[in-house]
Each structure stands twice: as structure tokens, then as C-alpha cells.
Amino acid sequence: MSESAVVQLPPESPAETAARWFALRRRKPDSLEEQQFADWLECDPANRRAYEEVTRSWEISALASADPTVVAMRSDALMLRPQKQREYAPLWGTLATAATVLLGLTGIYVTNPGLVHQAMRPGPSPDHMLLHTGVGQQATATLQDGTSVTLNTDSTLEVDYSALRRDVRLISGQALFKVVHNASRPFVVTAGNRQVIDVGTEFEVQLQGQKVSVALLEGRVQVQPLATSARDREAPTQPVAILAPGEQLIAGAEGDVTVKPADVEQLVSWKSGRIRFNDTPLSDAVAEMNRYNHTPIVLADPSLSDIRITGSFRAGQSWPFAEAVGEAFSLKAEVTGDSIRIRRQLKINIAEKN
């Protein structure tokens, strides 16, 4: 990709996330999305207040839209807009009230007004750009074709659309895709040494070093090795995997591939601001929590790694997580310098005096 626009996706505020949930629930979300919405409401009182405010704003705007004066003003404004912008008018009128910004000049919807100045600058086509989130941030963007992508913490995605293909490359981190299917223009995600080809679906891709994980929520995807030569494209040396909903593929750096059933609700719980663990080794849970915070959690004793934990924790809240682990397993959590240490309690023997 020779030229690209870099779009930094800042974290969503409760109001912006509430706007996205409100818009999504108006089109009858599936059961998984409803559970994610319920989790998001429960994880922070500010979320519920934000959603109630968005609902009230919608009701007020619906009443105002019928006012003759407002109708006349909207008609005059539409006549002054270029034709392409008029096509977006219904969405703008509906979601701007709910703090969603339409980037009309790039054809991309994002859920944070701070992107407007960056994305509306004259320059490269929106078909070629980078999307990025920082540590502890999450954000959602809707691409020109209507495909929705949600980036998790510290993630970078390259978008490279052409007339024949919709290519995106996960450079780092984790992304959840909800793809608008187009058989004549396939949607292909490249991550590490794997390619995921959409067959009309919702799926998650995570890149950890050279390890690639693909989890399918609904629909169907094809996962295949990344072809590095014409010979590989004509006769792949490794088998192509077709995933069914509820399955996860894990591909290692050496080409080893595992397909297994997965708890997809747990895998995508990060989208609602929660991280769920189910009989997870403490070392893995700590590594996952550290992805969302600049202050790392450190296990002082390697033997603590094998402790298994189950529970739901708020992303980015490392100290409450460390405290909960300490209380559950009689360990000590403490802040030392620029890290949080979890260690065993010191045992003090008091000798009896005769």
C-alpha cells in the first residue's frame, strides 16, 4: 500500500457506545449481541445513564422532526447539500443526536467526533487507510461497504479496498468483523501467515506475535495459509479450513493448526468492556489483563502461574483484578514502582518462650 490515511481511533465514551448500541438494537440484534448489551449496561452505572439519555434524545428528536418549522429547515438544508451528502441525511439526522459522527468525505462512520479533523483532510482515498487504537482503547468504524470493524486494545488494521477485492490486514492486536457479503468482491483478512475469507459472517481475528486465532460467531469463513508464491496459490501446501459458528482456529508460527469448539461469548466479551475467564491459568489471565493497561501485573513466583481462575473483570482495571486474585487465593497484591506484583503471603513464625 503506497499511500494511506492514518486514523487514530480514540476510546469511546459511554455516550458514544450508548449511541452505537441504540442504533444496533433498532435493527433487532441477535441473542449474542443482546447479551453483550446487557453486560455493557451492568458493568458501569454510567453506561445505563448514557443509554437512557440517548433514548430520551431520540424521543425528543422524533417529536421535533414533525414540527413544520423543523421540516422546512431540513428541506432547505438538504437542497444546499451535494447529492452524495443527501444520501446520508437520514442517518445523520438520526445518529448525530446520539453522538455518532458521519465522515462524509471519507465514507467511513466512526464513533468519536475527534476523528473528524483527521479523516476529513484532503488526501488519500478512504479505500486505503490505517485504523489504530492505543493501549486500553476500543473503537468501532463502519467502512464504505457497510462492513463494521471493532478494534480492541492496542490494535492496528490496514484497509486496502479495490474494485475486485476488499483486503484488510491485521497488523497487530484484535478485531471483530461484521461483514456485508458481496460474492463478486470478497472480503479477505490477512493476519500473520493466515488469510480469512468471508462467506457472509461475523468473526474475530487476533494476532499475538506469529500466533493467529480466528473465532466464528455466525455465518461461515474460510481460513487458509497466506500464499507467498504463484505455486502456493495454485497448489496450497496446507489444508484450507472451513469454520462453523462456535469454532475457533489457532494457527502457530510453524504451520500447526488446531480447530476446536469455543465459548464465543467469552472470546468477544471485551467488546462490552469485560474480560471473562473460565478455568484459565493465572499467567494467561494476567497476560490478557496487561493488554489493557500501561501498568503491568507481575507474578513474583512462577509457581503462581498454574492457579486457575474463573470470573469476569473490567478491562483496564488491573488493580481490582489483582486484589480479587489476592483475596481468592490468599495472595498479596501490591504496587511496586511501575508495576503491580502478586506474591505469596509472608509466613511469620513466632517462637513460644518458655
Image (spheres, rainbow, N blue to C red):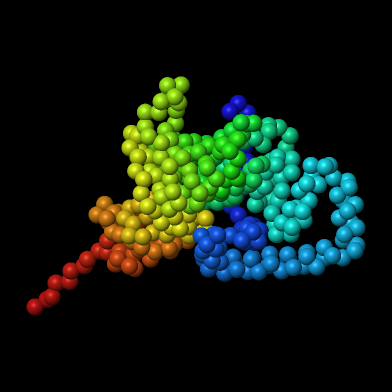
Q: Most extreme residue toward the top, as rendered?
A: 230
Residue at horizontal 82%, vertical 63%? Answer: 65
| Left or right: where 74 falls relative to 32 | right
Seen from the viewer's position, the closer of residues 282 and 57 is: 57
Q: Could you tell me residue 294's position as x and y percent?
A: 47, 50
Q: Which residue is found at the position 44% from the left and 55% from the top?
A: 264
* Quadrant occupied by the C terminus: bottom left
Residue, x 29% and y 54% (percent of image)?
Answer: 305
Asked if residue 240 can be seen in this view, the reply is yes
Q: Residue at x 91, y 62 (%)?
A: 69
Instruction: In this rendered view, identify the residue nearer to me: 147 or 138.
Output: 147
Indicate the quadrant containing the N terminus: top left, top right, bottom left or bottom right.
top right
Depth order, front residue of 292/19? 19
Name the spot of residue 41 as percent of width and height, x first.
Answer: 56, 66
Residue 246 located left or right of residue 272: left
Q: Nearer the viewer, residue 338 or 143?
A: 143
Task: Determine whether 184 is above or below 32 in the image.
Answer: above
Q: Position of residue 91 (x, y in %)?
A: 74, 53
Residue 40 seen in the current view: no
- The picture quadrant where one finds residue 325 is bottom left
Q: Is residue 200 shown above or below 98? A: above
* As drawn, 164 above or below 109: above
Q: Residue furthest front?
A: 183
